[in-house]
Amino acid sequence: MRLLHTMLRVGNLDRSLMFYTDVMGMHLLRRKDYPEGRFTLAFVGYQDEDQGAVIELTHNWDTESYNLGNGYGHIAIEVEDAYDTCATIKAGGGLVVRDAGPMKHGTTVIAFVEDPDGYKIELIQRNSRKG
């Protein structure tokens, strides 16, 4: 068994695709419209789906926004340098909601960004995790 994808419902697919591809540096792996169901699925990631987990962006054509609730946490992405990645994300128009730095009560360097729909993405700096 292996983890395939995480699905996020998005209100504006073009805006979300721009964020995940242009700002976060992912690749659009596939996209398909389902006119009878009035929705589109788009899959983005850093690797092909047969090599690693990806994100499925689900756009229901008649829904412009979602209430995220209080059960969702975040997606985590490993990065070489969290400080540089935050600078790149900010330069690309992305929202950094917690600048890079050591996590509270630890040494792991983390940061948090937020996508256009309000989903949180944690950046974890490679080689800063202990134990």
Image (spheres, rainbow, N blue to C red):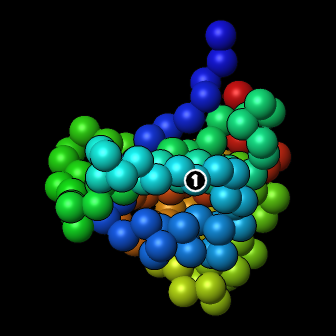
Question: Which residue is farthest top?
Answer: 1
Q: Position of residue 119 (x, y in %)?
A: 38, 57
Q: Is residue 54 above or below residue 123?
A: above
Q: Position of residue 92 (x, y in %)?
A: 62, 85
In-image side of 119 versus 75 (left or right)? left
Which residue extends farthest front? 36
Residue beneath the point at 64% across and 50% down: 30
x and y, in percent, of residue 24 in the image: 64, 67
Q: Which residue has dot 1 on it?
A: 31
Q: Quadrant of the C terminus?
A: top right
Question: Which residue is pictured at 66% across the width and 75% down the height?
Answer: 22
Q: Position of residue 21 (x, y in %)?
A: 65, 68
Q: Residues within 10 Å of mark 1 (few under 14, many from 20)?
A: few
Where, by quadrant of the figure, is residue 87 drawn?
A: bottom right
The part of the image, by quadrant, that contains residue 12 is bottom left
Three-letter amino acid code at the position of disc 1: Arg
Residue at image coords 37%, 44%: 73
Which quarter shows the N terminus?
top right
